[in-house]
Image (tube, helix red, strand yellow):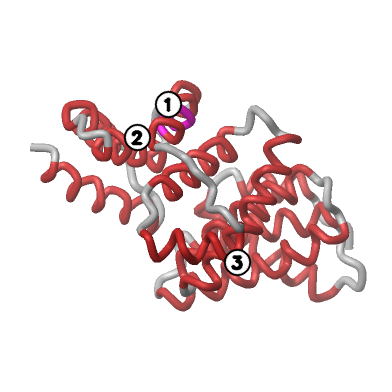
Amino acid sequence: MKMNFQEIDQLLSDKRNSHQVYEKLKMQIVSEGEIDVELLWRFIQSCHQKALFSGTFNEKKNILIEGRNHAQQAVHTHPNHPNLLKFAAMVTGKSVEFVGLTDKVRQGKLFKEYLDSASELLPDDTRLLHLRARYKFSMSQMNWIERKAINAVFMVAPDHTIDEALEDLLEVYRKEPTWLDNLLYIAKSYHVKKDKVKALEFVEKCLHETAIDDEDFHHQKEAKELMGKCK
């Protein structure tokens, strides 16, 4: 049965439909012998979205690893597909939050490869720019144990500053001023820079937005904690 991708894309435009899309696409994947890359990247996107609504730690982890495994297999076959690389980066990057340090470093290297490749093909994509900013933020805040582990994989750990992360975050903000995740990371970046006034400004913007999924609620909880440090 031919999949109506226009219908799927319409459903994916609202992440609250993630469970419905995930089940629909998984059924199609199970029934097909050779899987269309256009089906695969949308399934990987649905895994990323579904994880934002899955209840427990293990539920989130399992759905992300499922998406990550499909992504990594698909990239071998379709190494230059823009949307596949984009969602491979997104699901791989998200999955590192649920694994130990060794796997985190190994998957983090893959994430960076996907991110770089996707960004070359989709240079104006704000999701990719935000991911790049988050990566730079993480690299700038590494402790010595993390840096030692990353050195073992990268030979020399990527060197990024909080100012580089903030520059990307502010560029995303100019294009998507109400994006809750981005607002939180701008606030966190200003807090690292010890600019409490600007940090508080973006904390308040973050808390003003409506939370939809588990990650939104977690980020607003983090924003409230950050607010206490800014006063």
Residue found farthest to the bottom: 58
Tag 1 secondary structure:
helix
Give the distance between the C-alpha atoms of the residues marked 1 and 3, in whole angstroms.
Answer: 29 Å
Tell us which disc is closer to us: 2 or 3: 3
Q: Residue at x 42, y 44 (%)?
A: 137
Q: Which quadrant: the C terminus?
A: top left
Q: Name the residue under label 3.
A: 106
Q: Which residue does the numbered mark 1 point to in the structure image? A: 170
- The type of residue carrying mark 3 is Arg
Marks 2 and 3, how far apart at CA: 27 Å
Residue 4 drawn at (x, y percent): 80, 51
Left or right of 42 on screen, residue 105: left
Residue 10 is inside the magenta segment? no
**Mark 2 burial class by Cα count in 10 Å: few <14, some 14-19, many 20+:** many
Q: Where is residue 68 in the image (x, y as percent from the top left)?
A: 65, 65
Q: Name the residue under label 2.
A: 186
Tag 1 near tag 2, CB within 8 Å = yes
| Disc 3 element | helix
In percent of width and height, residue 161 lies at 42, 37
Check disc 2 and give the amino acid type: Ile
The amino acid type found where label 1 is placed reads Leu
Left of 191 or right of it: where is 219?
A: right
Part of the protein shown in magenta: 166-170
Q: Residue at x 17, y 32 (%)?
A: 196
Looking at the image, is mark 1 or mark 2 earlier in the sequence? 1
Q: Which residue lies furthest to the right in this view?
A: 34
Counting the numbered discs, the total is 3
Depth check, mark 1 against mark 3: the one in front is: 3
